[in-house]
Amino acid sequence: MSDDTFTYEFMLHYSPSPLGSSPIIRGREVSVSIQCHYLRKHDVSSGLLKPTWSPFGDDKYSEESLYFSLRLMTDDWQQRRPSAQFLLGDMMKFEASVKQFHHSPLRVIVDSCVANVVPNVDTVPRYTFLGNSGCLYDSQLTGSSSRFLPRSQDDKVQFEVEAFSFEQDNSGMLHITCSLRAIAAASAFSNTNKDCSFADGRWKDARGNHHFCSCCDSDCGKAGGSDLLTL
């Protein structure tokens, strides 16, 4: 205290909680020392948070000469993303594709995607943000805007997920393993052939076949022939 001011000093702690029933957060723990001076204002800022994420993309040939690819794309979806940095809550844009070579036309399906802090799907923490043969759970579990985009071609599927990190993990790294599958493009839509996101309180398929998403809250069954890509 001085002759003309009173000074109050305290520490403000913010620790984000996991979103919904997931193990992930979209904020950083911050501690800020604050001083309040009577008759004066003091601005306090936690600064810009810049978690560093590893850029990724992976390709794999299957035994049947199919060429699977999973890439992180730029905001306009025109090319592979060159930057390795995201802010929490930014959209990570994924593009999965299959090249058919001598095969008849194919449709690529993303069966599941799991995030870990190390390149091992059996470790914890672990977050299955997409599963059950094409259900994008992140939008349901955390209330995010994560979603599948409508397709422009069968052999390519695009989806976007809000950037996140694990609670109490400061590495700034994510390793993502996705299971991709190719089926004939002429195959009928089904519980295991869908691109479902959760919006407006219900599951919706990006191609309009919403009734096939009703199994996302139970068991959609399994289809064989998936290839794993670890990014």
Image (cartoon, rainbow, N blue to C red):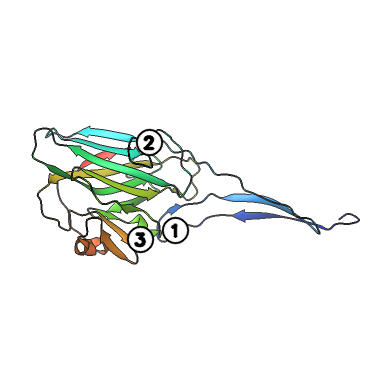
Residue 140 - label: 3
Sequence-wise first label, 1 or 3: 1
Q: Observer-nearest residue: 173 or 214?
A: 214
> As drawn, is 175 to the left or to the right of 100?
right
Quarter of the picture containing the C terminus is top left
Q: Observer-nearest residue: 114 or 46?
A: 46
User: Image point 34% across, 39% down: which residue?
Assistant: 72
Residue that mark 1 sits on: 19
Q: Observer-nearest residue: 91 or 122?
A: 91
Give the CA separation, mark 2 to mark 3: 26 Å
The quadrant where residue 41 appears: bottom right
Sequence-wise first label, 2 or 1: 1
Question: Neighbour class for label 2 at 10 Å: few (<14), some, many (≥20)?
Answer: some
Residue at the bottom extreme of this rendering: 201
Residue type marked 3: Gln
Residue 83 horizontal/vertical position (percent):
43, 34
Residue that mark 2 sits on: 81
Give the CA separation, mark 1 to mark 3: 10 Å
